[in-house]
Image (tube, helix red, strand yellow):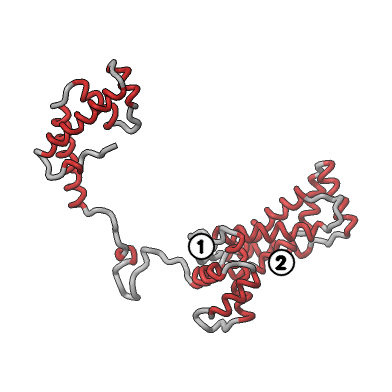
Amino acid sequence: MAHFDDSATQRANVRYIRQSMKQPLLSRDKELDLARRWREENDETALHELVSAYTRLVVSMAARFRNYGLPTGDLVQEGNVGLMQAAARFEPERDVRFSTYATWWIRSAMQDYVLRNWSIVRTGTTAAQKSLFFNLRRLRAKIADVSATQMTDEERRSIAEELRVNVSDVEQMEGRLAASDQSLNAHVGEDGESEWIGFLRDDGPSPEEVVIGLKDSESRSLWLREAIGELSEREQTIIRRRRLVEDGATLEELGKVLGVSKERVRQLEHRAMEKLKTSIAKRVDRADDLLIEA
């Protein structure tokens, strides 16, 4: 999915990159002092100085993801989010440089952004897919003939072993990266007037089938109402409350309503169903199309 920056955005990006590169580097002691002041005293000035010193990390990381066709400015913004998350979670008492800690958060933020926006189809939903998405091309360039349309089975197995994933995952990601998003409204051929969407198969019923179905449904409903009208009052109560609602009443519940045992309700229900089948059979070829045994 291609993305383009206009000229004004590009100039703004260049200014930001130049400004980031002018920020002074921090010594280990200065870095820890700023981190402590932010963490313990909520000193926003210290936070600003700490974060500003490492925007160069964001710019550097954004350059690594430039081949995915996404705007540099957006990558930098996502990286800055990761940088802020690192500042919020950094623990000065641990023996690690903030730059080392922040690098992981910046990379993670950019990777998530790339996976969300590289294609309109969701990509990299599992750890294996994410690893393949960001490493497949690099590993293929090392071991395979990049001019070939597809990798060999041996090359796929080698990459699967390297990344500790299944060969099937490698094959699926290979096909996914080789494809590109296409608009269904794109024209077929250079001078064609037809669009791709016009060639999609519609598995739904045709307008004629819809009309016929509605008409048949009306007829069946009428036949069923007429057949139920021929039942006794008790039989109608049983059929309506047992068969014509989603959560039908139990035999015991109907027995209490009608003042009979549940076994008697079962007998009445069976007799009513037989009457309905006989009545409907006079109107349709197959009564089973309307009545379903419980």
Q: Which residue is mark 1?
A: 119
Check if mark 1's residue and mark 2's residue have beta carbons within 8 Å: no
Among all residues in the image, which is located at the extreme front? 263
User: Residue 164, relative to residue 238: is it above or below?
Assistant: below
Residue at left 12%, top 45%?
Answer: 285
Q: Nearer the viewer, residue 121 or 185?
A: 121
Q: Which residue is mark 2?
A: 60
First reached walking from the N terminus: tag 1 or tag 2: 2
Quadrant assignment, res 246 = top left
Tell which tag, 1 or 2, sits nearer the viewer: 1
Dot 1: what SS?
Answer: loop
Q: Amino acid at mark 2?
A: Ser
Residue at left 33%, top 71%?
Answer: 188
Along the horizontal axis of the image, is 56 left or right of 242?
Answer: right
Among all residues in the image, which is located at the extreme left? 282
Dot 2: what SS?
Answer: helix
What distance separates the C-alpha of mark 1 from that of mark 2?
A: 24 Å
Q: Position of residue 96 (x, y in %)?
A: 84, 57
Q: Nearer the viewer, residue 76 or 126?
A: 126
Q: Position of residue 196 (x, y in %)?
A: 34, 66
Q: Position of residue 220 (x, y in %)?
A: 17, 39
Q: Amino acid at mark 1?
A: Ser
Q: Nearer the viewer, residue 173 or 41?
A: 173
The total number of labels drawn is 2
